[in-house]
Amino acid sequence: EDKVVQSPLSLVVHEGDTVTLNCSYEVTNFRSLLWYKQEKKAPTFLFMLTSSGIEKKSGRLSSILDKKELFSILNITATQTGDSAVYLCASSSGTYKYIFGTGTRLKVLA
Amino acid sequence: DVKVTQSSRYLVKRTGEKVFLECVQDMDHENMFWYRQDPGLGLRLIYFSYDVKMKEKGDIPEGYSVSREKKERFSLILESASTNQTSMYLCASSYPDKNTEAFFGQGTRLTVV
């Protein structure tokens, strides 16, 4: 059965800290690994990763994929209160279904 | 911009009612999805449609059905709503043959009393 596992489930940090969110996957016919940010509404897309070892970066956020070990990490540097959200990891399979993990709830304190 | 629109942000229904959740997308996507999101359980796939009138069960289809009569519209139907179907429902769409992200609607928070 395909599955995506995220850790930790929740995290509380102070502004300025750096955080690393983890995502491991076991998916048949893997196509891509996606990260989303969800505040009190629809998930918004952050990154899609298809190749091992190539970092994707957007401002203070970055992500990388390891297809041999079947995991990805999302890094957020110099966290701000606006980074508080649920971060979702998903894997796209051969049939283009998206399998999601449970999410990591991040709270950044001022 | 891709737009996925769900018909309601909030709904309150009574146990036993038949409930329709509507989703419309404007990007000509073949694939459409219905997920439910519950604390600690993440997003779980209810149903998936890859073309008009085509559907496939997801991980938790029991108690739900779907309808896709037109490409842009995907409806989720709760045949007889129960309190354990109280949840956030998210619709999404994507291209079938490109490795791209799924685009989400704003979600419908359904409460069954």
Image (cartoon, rainbow, N blue to C red):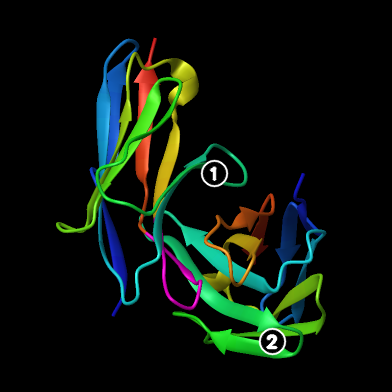
Amino acid type shown at disc 2: Glu
Q: Quick one: label 1, few (<14), some, or many (20+) residues within 10 Å?
A: some
Vertically, is A88 above or below A81?
Answer: below
Relative height, residue A10 to residue A101 (above, below): above
What residue lies at 30% left-to-right and 71% top-to-bottom? A27
Q: Which chain is home to disc 1?
A: A
Question: Does the magenta-highlighted stretch encompass residue A94?
Answer: yes
- The chain to which mark 2 is attached is B
Image label count: 2
Indicate the secondary structure of the residue bearing disc 1.
strand
In x, y percent, where is residue A104? Answer: 34, 43
Determine whether A96 is above or below B60 in the image. Answer: above
Q: In which quarter of the image is residue B41?
A: bottom left
Label 2 sits on residue: B79
**What's drawn in magenta, residue-wise?**
A90-100
Q: Which residue is the site of mark 1?
A: A45
Q: Is residue B68 left or right of residue B104?
A: right
User: Going by the image, does A100 lie left or right of A25?
Assistant: right
Q: In which quadrant will I find the N terminus of chain B?
A: top right
Q: Residue B83 location in percent, x, y?
A: 56, 71
Query: What residue is drawn where x is 58% and y is 58%?
Result: B102
